Amino acid sequence: MITPTGTPRDATVLEARGVTKRFAGITALDNVDFTLHPGESLALMGENGAGKSTLIKVLTGVYQPDAGELHLGGTTTTFARPLDAQRSGISTIYQEVNLIPLLSVAQNIFLGREPRDRWGLIDFKQLNEDARTLLDTYDIHVDVRRPLHRLALGMQQMVALARAVSIDARVVIMDEPTSSLEAREVETLFRVIGLLRAQGIAIVYVSHRMDEIYRVCDSVTVLRDGKSVHSGLLADLPRVELVSIMLGRSVEKTKRESLTAFGSARTSSQAPTLIATNLTRKHQISGISLEIRPGEVVGLGGLLGSGRSETLKALAGVMKVDNGHVHVGGRLVKNGSVSAAIRAGIVMLPEDRKAEGIIPNLSIRDNIVLAALPRLSVGGFTSRTRQDAIVDVFMKRLRIKATSSSQLVSELSGGNQQKVMIARWLAMNPRVLLLDEPTRGIDVGAKAEVQALINELADEGLAIVMVSSEVEEVVEGSARVIVLRDGSVETELIGDEVTEHHLLSALVGEPITVTKELP
């Protein structure tokens, strides 16, 4: 096979061979192989925690591998720092533009490499001329003297791209480059990518958007749990199969599963506890509407970047929406107000319990009663006896394993930390419980306990919305599954439609056919 520049396919520009990276005993990359050819556009795919960001940081000198080798142009190399990688021709464009807003376009492009006059001062005339010449090469038209912050976000992204290739780039890594771009700006980016490839510059493209991946990239490397599990041409890989590889699910296995045992998951005929209508926030979610009834566990299905977590944050008041409304029990909940959501009975268990949930230096007891303190106080004072009673009830009910309620929550296992977080919100006597990856990072036994607890809470009438990256968990734990794709509702699976195969098909926009009998 020949690349766009006419270079034989077996020529390589960048390779990782058996790369391993560990952090505090946790293996983030495990014997990863990665190969990139000149002029190639390669999609780097994987769900949260797959190892994509760690691999990019190894390739760009942010991290050094604990084992394995990097090869640049066929020669073994090491990057002690990002500057070494940049000088070797490896540039990265991040999702958030990391330039200097108050400097001009030209100054940002050549920052640290400005042309100088004979007195050693910046030659602004030459600087602006060089910047114009570079941007004209990629048909990007902007006044290079304007401060960067006065440009639209899409044009700022183009300036970041121009800077990346201005250092004689051989490889450009793009991390979610279209996440904040309008449709017209996306087309400009794709055109520039084509020009770069024609010059022999290789592209590593990280995105959760399947349509983009199949349009821009000709090959793919998939990471899962820190391992490279697939590399090959995209033309040979149907979308549903790619998703199956990312999630670790067998396509043939899911096709055989036309009926699912729901356990305690069931639909409800009662009036909805929560109604969300047309929730919209630019570049994140668009027109999300859903209803959750008492005793229901409703799954939000979707790949990374589909809008799952953003939808939960909108419901919980963590994220303010541009349009749309949330009602609980018929009453409007104030937009973008966590306190209003809690008063209405909506509580949320966040995805990252360590960063957004537990307070590690406090005890189990303090972590549980934290949210309920205003409700427990009388005249500004809180009763220790009342607090202890609440903590005792939930430690027993949730079977939290600890020496005592005074033990630091940071000393508990991941599963017990998760239970402490759930206890905190149950102490608020909520009506709606939002769960973002409730079993992530906990062992199999603890996972089963948390799943059983979710079913118990639903049996008691709590309305539950659950996000999980594990297809099996969403299918087995949910009465209904609302499938999100690119920030919008793709479809809703109900009853016999709730199977792994149907969910995988919906994730990539394929039609769903319900089979009543096993083949």
Image (cartoon, grey):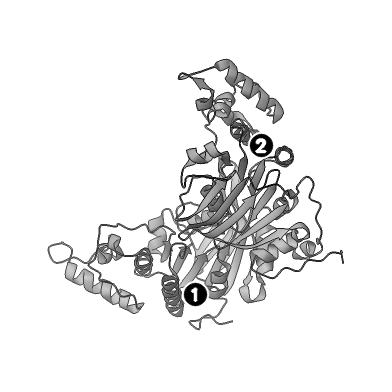
What residue is disc 2 on? 415
SS class, disc 2: helix
Q: Earlier in the sequence, mark 2 or mark 1?
A: 1
Q: Amino acid at mark 1?
A: Pro
Q: Where is residue 233 shown, x and y percent of the image?
A: 62, 74
Q: Alpha-carbon neighbours of circle 2 within 10 Å: few (<14), some, or many (≥20)?
A: many
The residue at 46%/65% (across/down) is 178
Q: Amino acid at mark 2?
A: Gly
Q: Where is residue 49 shown, x and y percent of the image?
A: 58, 51
Residue in the foreground of this view, choosing between 376 and 358: 376
Camera sees residue 250? no
As measured in the structure, the alpha-carbon distance from the residue carrying label 2 to the one carrying label 1 is: 46 Å
What residue is disc 1 on? 38
Query: Does residue 479 appear left or right of residue 385 in this picture?
Result: right
Disc 2 and disc 1 in contact, CB within 8 angstroms: no
Q: Quadrant of residue 426?
A: top right
Q: Where is residue 440 shown, x and y percent of the image?
A: 64, 45
The residue at 55%/82% (across/down) is 2
Q: Quadrant of residue 430?
A: top right
Q: Alpha-carbon neighbours of circle 1 within 10 Å: few (<14), some, or many (≥20)?
A: many
In the image, is residue 266 above or below residue 496? above
Q: Where is residue 104 shown, x and y percent of the image?
A: 25, 63
The N terminus sits in image quarter: bottom right
What's the mark number on residue 272? Answer: none
Residue in the foreground of this view, choosing between 93 and 435: 435
